[in-house]
Image: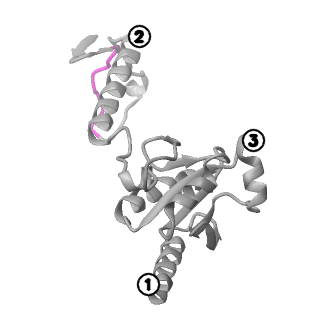
Amino acid sequence: MTATLGHVTVRNVAPRRSPAPCVRGPSSQRRTMLVAKSSKEEAVKQLEQFGAGLHAKVDESAPSTVPVTPLAAKSVDASVSGSIDGGLLELNKDTFWEYLKLQGDTLVVVDFYTDWCGPCKLIYPELVKLSQERTDVRFVKVNCNKTNKELGMALAIKVAPTFHLYRNSTKVADMTGAKLDKLVALINEQQQQYAGNN
């Protein structure tokens, strides 16, 4: 016996001869075989279409880049160049000290990170968001890779992420680890100290 139910073909269906729907008799030992009409290729195609639909929904809801706050991306006179990846200005060994000098008494938070550091990647979007909220502070980053190794060694960077806070080209505070609450408290403490002294 063969029956078609929607997209599925059912073959070798034995009629029920059991006394009650819950009880199986000896004739029900035949197995029911389901054969799907759609082939393996069609199933793969359907999965690809489903995945494409998900990607489209994600792309619609999430921006592809993080908006940049001009204060987070430029120095006071915009003379220091650096790369901006949709977030913080990235300094290197050649632009680091010049940038700090140009900022004067503005508090500068420097994120020393590495490309392979998981916690660095996790805290970065939060730093970008914080840089947009805190216009009284400049946020920059320095990749402690081979090209900036000398700078990292000179500043005794041993752990990633490490955050240094500078004012007037002088380090006023530092911390290690991807602890946003601790960093915000450190920034607030430095800003209060500076306001109290002036």
The quadrant of the image that shows the N terminus is top left
Decide if residue 182 is in sight here.
yes
Residue drawn at 38 percent across, 21 percent down:
48
Q: Quadrant of residue 135?
A: bottom left
Query: Helix, strand or loop at disc 1?
Result: helix
Per the model, the C-alpha gap separating discs 2 and 1 is 68 Å
- For the image, the number of numbered tags is 3
User: Which mark is on residue 99?
Assistant: none
**First along the sequence among labels 2 and 1:** 2
Decide if residue 158 is in sight here.
no
Residue drawn at 51 percent across, 79 percent down:
190
Whether residue 49 sits left or right of residue 171 in the image: it is left
Q: Amino acid at mark 2?
A: Glu
Assess disc 3: are there few (<14), some (14-19) or many (≥20) residues with their C-alpha within 10 Å of its C-alpha.
Answer: few
Query: Helix, strand or loop at disc 3?
Result: helix
Q: Position of residue 7 (x, y in %)?
A: 25, 16
Q: What residue is shown with label 1?
A: 195
User: Who is closer to the viewer here, 8 or 184?
Assistant: 184
Q: What residue is shown with label 2?
A: 41
Q: Residue furthest left?
A: 6
The quadrant of the image that shows the C terminus is bottom left
Q: Is residue 100 above or below residue 53?
A: below
Q: Quadrant of residue 134?
A: bottom left
Q: Amino acid at mark 1?
A: Ala
Q: What residue is shown with label 3?
A: 146
Q: Position of residue 115 (x, y in %)?
A: 63, 44
**Which of the two discs, 3 and 2, sits closer to the camera?**
3
Magenta-tinted stretch: 11-21
Q: Is residue 141 above or below residue 187?
A: above
Q: Position of residue 170 (x, y in %)?
A: 63, 70
**Which of the two discs, 1 and 3, sits closer to the camera?**
1
Assess disc 1: are there few (<14), some (14-19) or many (≥20) residues with their C-alpha within 10 Å of its C-alpha.
Answer: few
